[in-house]
Amino acid sequence: MNHHNTEAITGLLDGELKGLRRWMVQRHVNHCSACAEEYRRQEQVRQLLRANPTVTPMSDSPEFFWSKVKTEIQRRGDERVAASMPQLTFADWLRQHQLALATAAAALIAVVGVLWLTPAFRGTTTVAALAPTTTDFARVDHLKTPIPHTVATAFDSEDADVTVIWVTGLPWTPDMDRMKTEFANLDT
C-alpha cells in the first residue's frame, strides 16, 4: 500500500482484511506516520463508542411492552386485516420476465434458422439421377445437396419397371462415362 487509504485502515480495524492485503496495510500503517495517526484516531473513536453505548429509552419495561403486544393479539383474535395488493403493469411484468423472454426469443431465432437451412423448407429438392450401366440404367443415391437451376421431369416408359428422369440444367454429354463423372461430382 503506497498511498493513504482511510477505508483500508477502517477495514484493518474491523477485521475485514485477510492474508496479504492485511499484511500490506498493517506494514504501511507501521511505516507511515499519517496513516498511523489515522489508525490511532479511529481506534480512539471505537473505544469511546464501546465505553458509551447508546441506550434507547423505553417508556415501559420489556416485560410490560410484550404483555401489551400479547393482549392486543388476543383481543383481535381471528380478525382479518385487509391489505391492498399492488397491481402489476405490463412493464413490471416484462421486467420480471426478462430472462424468460430473452430465452424464448433466442429459441425462436434458432428454430427459424434451422428451418431456413432445411432444403425442404426453402422449396428446393434433391434430385435422384440415373447412371447408365452397360445394359440398363440403375438408380444413383440421392444427391446430398440440391442442384440449383435444375428441373427433374419423370416420363413413364413402356416397360413397367422403368421410369426415365430427365434433368434439365445439367451439362449433357453423349459419353456415358463422362456423364457418370459429372453426376458423381455434383455432391462435392
Image (cartoon, grey):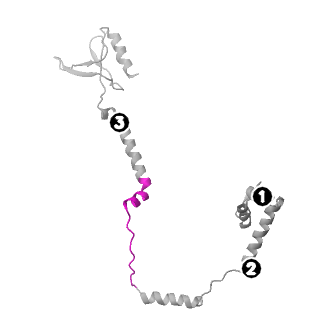
Sooner in the amino-acid sequence: mark 1 or mark 2? 1
The residue carrying pointer 3 sits among few (fewer than 14), some (14 to 19) or many (20 or more) residues within 10 Å by Cα, namely few
Q: Which amino acid does label 3 sit on?
A: Trp
Question: In this picture, is 176 found above or below 139?
Answer: above
Q: Which of marks 3 and 1 is nearer the N terminus?
A: 1
- In terms of image quadrants, where is residue 164? top left
Element at label 2 = helix
Asked whether, in this view, residue 126 is left or right of residue 75, the answer is: left
- Tag 2–tag 3 contact (CB < 8 Å): no
Q: Please tell me whether residue 159 belongs to the stretch shown in magenta.
A: no
Q: Which residue carries the number 3 mark?
A: 116
Q: Which amino acid does label 1 sit on?
A: Trp
Q: What residue is drawn where x is 33% and y is 26%?
A: 146
Q: Position of residue 114 (x, y in %)?
A: 37, 38
Question: Label 1's element?
Answer: helix
Q: Distance between the residues labelled 2 and 3?
A: 76 Å
**Where residue 116 sits: x, y (%)?**
35, 36
For badge 2, the amino acid type reads Ala
Q: In this view, does 163 lie above or below 56?
A: above
Instruction: Reply above or below: 112 against 49.
Output: above
Q: How many angstroms separate mark 1 from mark 2 (CA)?
A: 29 Å
User: In which quadrant is the C terminus drawn?
Assistant: top left
Quarter occupied by the N terminus: bottom right
Lateral position of residue 116 relative to residue 152, left or right: right
**Residue bearing mark 1:** 23
Inter-mark Cα distance, 3 to 1: 61 Å
Q: Give the range drawn in magenta.
A: 78-100
Q: Name the residue under label 2.
A: 51
